[in-house]
Amino acid sequence: MAAAPRLTSNSDETEVDGLLSGDNIFSIPYFQRAYKWKPAKLDQLQQDFLNIVDGAVDLHFLGAIIIHGRRSSPANPKIFDVIDGQQRLTTLYLYLTAAVDQLIEMKQFDQAASLFLKYLAIGRSTSLPSNFKLHPCKEDRHQFNIVMENLLSDDNFLNHLGSFEPKYLPETGEKTGRLRSNYRLACRFFKDQFDAEGIERVEAIYTKIVEAVSVVQIDVQDPTNGPKIFDALNSRQEPMTIGDLVRNEIFSRVADMDPDQIEQIDQQYWQPFYRKFKQNGKNLFDSFFFPYGLIQKPNLKKSQVYRALREEWSEIREPKEIICQLETYQNAFIDIATGSNEEKHSSEIARCFYNLWSSNAPSSSYPFLMQLSKAIKDGKLSELEGKKILAVIESFLIRRAICGHEPTGLHAVFKKLWEDCDRDPTSEKVITEIKKHKTVVWPNDAATKSAILRRSLYGSRITRYVLLEYDKSLGGDQPKEVPWIEHVLPVNPDKEWYKKINKKQHKQYKDRIANLIPLTEEMNKSLSNKPYKNKRSCYLEDAMFKSTRQFAKKYEDWTPQMLKERGTQLGAWACERWLY
């Protein structure tokens, strides 16, 4: 066969002949989304086929197929997991199957058998559960089996296949769906072409499909890179996440099992693990694997996590064992990410972790905090020492946030902090190891007080937490309502305010934390830009938050001097609250 012209100079661009004619099997992961191409896409593809046959174009480039070679016995065909490109690959397979069906209808059994054994099936004996070159996902297997059973129902055709005996994957999914309906459309296409122009037309079409339709076939070492490559080469698709890849990797160990057994493993072990990540309307599943991977290997990059986990699990054959390993840190992760207490820590430890969540602790801290939580839970670290370490971490993060230091650099601090502390951390060790990172600032008292007094903190993610912690420090009831932040000196003051403050001072002071107090949304909106005397009476009589009531009691008027005075007082309090 003469080499067809190519669209790209990429050595991995291959015609369908090169893709499907080898001793290879393409396996769609068991729990992958079902085949879903709509008829409109088939209509366009059919027109592309006819354009090649009629000479309007030389070839058709179908895009990228991203695969990943699976470990298998040397005696068996090579199995490639399809990371991206399921829709294209399945469609090509269906059209070649439809071509074989039309040849059978025309009694062209030799051609049909040749096409079938070259592109659709493995002609030799293997120990694999199916000898078809496409292994669909769970949702499509029943439909696929029906298609192939119908194709092989002609005894004359079977005789031309020689010793070939079909091996079907266990039937899962519905009898009807997109795969079967698209196959019928493909069969109708070939029949219409035969009725119009005879057998030569059918032969020309399937010949051009295998010789002049090409794809870029990319075998990735790390499957997490598959969706990135696919997205760059094609229009945007529904992305495959690291969570999808992990699930596919786990269940590849049992892909040859009876579907009932696979479903039992899924329902008994995987689904409870997966569902637990759904918290407060969010799904934290995919964000779990990077901090978990760093616990295993602290120097991993995010793009390397899946490959590292896959290597770690290479000798494990039971999905349950892998899931149990992952569950080891699941509760700790959920607590840190949501403020919950799935680990059932004591109220004091739980409050420490809750504070870190409430203060928006960066995700870079998660690997260390997850290990810390587990060590406390397992009794390997005392609660007293655990509280001291958590206080150190909170002080470090809060002081940095108050002073405006971005979380840049914190990944380098936390990814190895557990190892740096010899897996036996103390508050002293944590302080020492963090301070070894010379480029990561740990603000001292002077810097923290200066930031409280002078920085514009309105809009900072830390401000609400600081105001609430100050409110808590005063004792009394703790309202559960999340407060709005009130500018005592308004953002848009009325003319009364300018009797005691000029425009330069207004711009300078309005967003400083000393000018901010917690209020309910309703009171915040009702007070708006009113003069201080009007606001003060409402603060005194109706404010839910104790710090707001005490503010009004202390300050009969609100001037730049009083604002500075309060800033100094808040700075001293902050350095006591976040002591380290």
Image (spheres, rainbow, N blue to C red):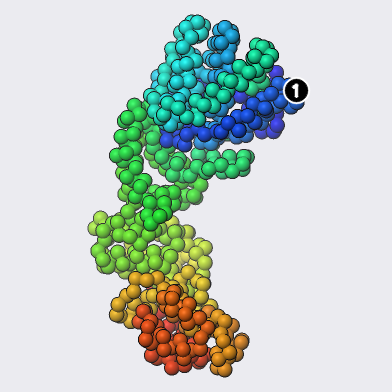
Rendered-image quadrant of the C terminus: bottom left
Q: Label 1 belongs to which residue?
A: 55
Question: Which residue is at 37% across, 79% downward?
Answer: 545
- Where is 191 relative to 412, above or below? above
209 sits to left or right of 249? right
Residues packed near mark 1 inside 10 Å, few (<14), some (14 to 19) or many (20 plus): few
Question: Which residue is at 47% across, 7% downward?
Answer: 155
**Residue reaching furthest to the right:** 56
Q: Position of residue 95 (x, y in %)?
A: 58, 22
Q: Position of residue 323 (x, y in %)?
A: 34, 42
Q: Amino acid at mark 1?
A: Gly
Q: Is residue 415 visible?
A: yes
Q: Position of residue 441 (x, y in %)?
A: 49, 70
Name the one closer to the observer, 573 or 248: 248
Name the one closer to the observer, 66 or 523: 523
Quarter location, residue 350: bottom left
Q: Is residue 215 visible?
A: no
Question: Which residue is at 60% across, 33% downward?
Answer: 40
- Where is 195 relative to 406, above or below? above
Quarter location, residue 61: top right
Name the one closer to the observer, 66 or 382: 66
188 sits to left or right of 149? right
Question: Regarding mark 1 in the picture, which secondary structure is present there?
Answer: loop
Q: Position of residue 282 (x, y in %)?
A: 42, 54
